[in-house]
Image (cartoon, grey):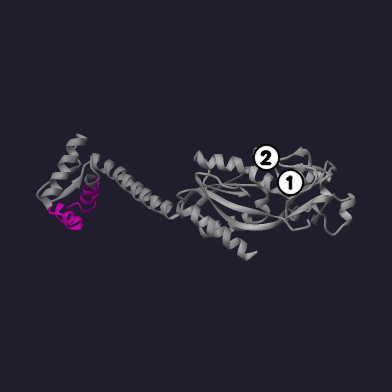
Amino acid sequence: MELRHLEYFLAVAQELHFGRAAQRLRVSQPPLTVAIRQLEQELGVALFERTTRRVSLTPEGEAFRSRAAEVLEDLDAAVAEVAEVSAGTRGRLRIGYVSSASYSVLPNALRAFSARFPAVRLDIQPLTSGEQVDALLEGDLDIGFLRDPGGVPGVRLSRVSEEELIAVLPSEHPLAQRDEVSPGDLIGEPLVLFPYRRMPGYVSRLMEVFEGLAHPPRVVQQAIHQETVMGLVAAGVGVSLVPESIRRIQMPGVVTRPIEGRPVSELFVVHGERPGAAVRAFVECSREALRDE
């Protein structure tokens, strides 16, 4: 059965006149008549009762009309939906993010994108940098936000922001009385850090802060999420280094101090080599969100 058979049938069913239906379809009447006969032969039923004076639908034709109309409407809707997905105005966008992004660019980017493209469903999930890269390469993620990733083959990286790294200290810690701390002040302290395997670039960036010192830092605990790190610091487990935006957490028992030399961390957006329209639009919303802060 060809699509044109359904279109021809519906035109005749609505006009109940082969001549007018042919004019409406901009075809000659003989091919229209042949197409209807072919359709009837394929279905094994008569769809129309024909006399010299009138054309009417048979009961089978009445039943087939509603179904054929639904098929064509669904097809039109599917074509329109495909066009919207291609344009980035409909569909689903799967977004991963490191926890620190939720205190900087991500909330405003989500808000701006949803206002512009309300028909695109956003599925967001917190993932470490390594998990995001794996998910992107496996096709399980469309876009991600990660910190200090270094070179990652198979994906495209764009820097979206840079912010200072700061020291996080228990509020009763002696260093909490200072306006600024140095890497040397922190080298002897128990350090709460992130697992290198899951966030290699970010952990390497943190370790660079201690380069040139006589001893390496003493890592006593690892945690994946910034909120967990802050909680461990508040509990007195150790001190840590985090991006400046984490100050927005407002966790009791914790103070933050700038670090001498003002080391920085960079937040990147990452996606596949050939991003779709929705991904490109979300990247732009992310940049706009930072400009509006």
Q: Residue at the location (81% across, 56% down)? A: 257
Residue 248 sits in quarter: bottom right
Q: Residue at the location (53% across, 55% down)? A: 282
| Dot 2 amino acid type | Tyr
Circle 1 crowding by C-alpha within 10 Å: few under 14, some 14–19, many from 20: some
Relative to residue 139, is residue 18 depicted above or below?
A: below
Mark 1 residue element: helix
Q: Is residue 8 rendered magenta in the image?
A: yes
Question: Is mark 1 in CB contact (under 8 Å) with mark 2?
Answer: no
Of 46 and 146, nearer the camera is: 146
Of 229 and 14, nearer the camera is: 229
Which residue of the protein is positioned furthest toward the top in this rendering?
Answer: 44
Which residue of the protein is positioned furthest toward the bottom in this rendering?
Answer: 292
Q: Is residue 150 rendered magenta in the image?
A: no
Q: Main secondary structure of the magenta part?
A: helix
The residue that mark 1 highlights is 227
The answer to whether residue 291 is visible is yes
The residue that mark 2 highlights is 196
Give how far across and how far down residue 39 sits, in percent: 19, 40
Q: Which residues are magenta?
A: 6-28
